[in-house]
Image: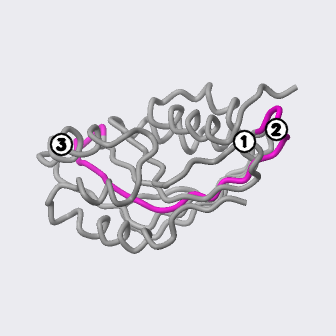
C-alpha cells in the first residue's frame, strides 16, 4: 500500500532529494516503473534523453548530479500548487548551483510536466518531462549576488516568475535566463 502522498508533497520530496543529494527519497517520490524524459536546449549541460525506472532516474537526477554540483536551489515557478487527486501538473522551474570542480555558478530555467499514478490515498510520480530552456555558466565571483542576494531570498521551493525576475541580480550573463523566464510568464501553471 502506498503512503498517503499528494502531488505537492511528491514534488517537494523530489526537490529535496535532488538539491540535498538524498537518493533514498526518490523511491518515496517515483513509481518503480516511472520514466524521465529530458529535452536540453543548451550546450552548457547534458543529460540522457530518457531514463526508465526509479533507479535510473535516481542515478541521473541525484547521484551523478550530486557528484558534479552543490549549493543547489530548485524552484517551482507557479502561482498555485498541485492539489490532491490531480493526475497531471505542469510548471516552470528555476535552478541555481555551483560546480564542485571549478566553483562556476550555473543558473538555468525550463519547464516540468508531472504525471501521477495511484489514487488519492497514495500517489507517485509516473512520468516527469523536463525541458531545459536556458542554462548559463557564470564565473565564481558571481556566487555572492546569485546565491546570497537572490536565490536564498526567494521563497523555497515555490516561487512566482514575477518575483524571481524582480529580484534577479543585474549580471549580464543572466540575461538569457531572464528573457526565458519573461517569455514563460505568459504560460503560468496548469492542472488537469
Give residue 98's position: percent from left, percent from top.
29, 42
Circle 2 SS class: loop
Per the rendering, the mark at residue 84 is: 1
Q: Nearer the viewer, mark 1 or mark 3?
A: 1
Measure the alpha-carbon separation of dots 3 and 2.
39 Å
Residue sitting at x 48%, y 30%: 21
Question: What span is in magenta?
Answer: 100-123
When asked about the image quadrant of residue 103, the answer is top left
Residue 73: quarter of image: top left
Q: Based on the displayed image, in which of its 4 quarters is residue 184 positioned? A: bottom left
Q: Is residue 3 left or right of residue 9?
A: right
Q: Is residue 141 left or right of residue 179?
A: left
- Location of mark 2 (residue): 120
Is 149 or 192 nearer to us in this picture? 192
In this view, the residue farthest toward the right is 1
- Nearer-N-terminus badge (3/2): 2
Residue at the spot of label 3: 149
> Going from the N terminus, do you reach mark 1 or mark 2 first?
1
Amino acid at each position: 500500500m502506498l503512503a498517503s502522498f499528494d502531488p505537492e508533497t511528491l514534488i517537494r520530496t523530489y526537490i529535496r532529494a535532488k538539491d540535498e543529494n538524498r537518493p533514498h527519497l526518490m523511491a518515496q517520490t517515483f513509481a518503480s516503473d516511472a520514466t524521465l524524459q529530458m529535452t536540453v536546449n543548451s550546450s552548457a549541460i547534458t543529460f540522457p534523453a530518457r531514463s526508465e525506472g526509479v533507479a535510473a532516474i535516481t542515478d541521473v537526477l541525484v547521484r551523478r548530479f550530486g557528484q558534479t554540483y552543490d549549493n543547489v536551489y530548485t524552484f517551482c515557478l507557479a502561482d498555485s500548487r498541485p492539489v490532491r487527486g490531480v493526475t497531471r501538473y505542469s510548471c516552470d522551474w528555476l535552478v541555481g548551483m555551483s560546480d564542485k570542480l571549478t566553483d562556476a555558478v550555473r543558473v538555468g530555467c525550463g519547464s516540468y510536466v508531472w504525471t501521477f499514478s495511484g489514487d488519492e490515498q497514495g500517489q507517485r510520480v509516473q512520468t516527469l518531462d523536463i525541458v531545459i530552456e536556458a542554462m548559463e555558466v557564470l564565473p565564481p565571483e558571481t556566487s555572492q549576488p546569485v546565491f546570497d542576494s537572490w536565490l536564498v531570498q526567494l521563497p523555497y521551493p515555490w516561487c512566482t516568475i514575477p518575483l524571481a525576475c524582480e529580484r534577479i541580480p543585474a549580471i549580464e550573463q543572466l540575461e538569457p535566463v531572464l528573457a526565458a523566464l519573461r517569455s514563460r510568464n505568459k504560460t503560468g501553471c496548469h492542472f488537469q
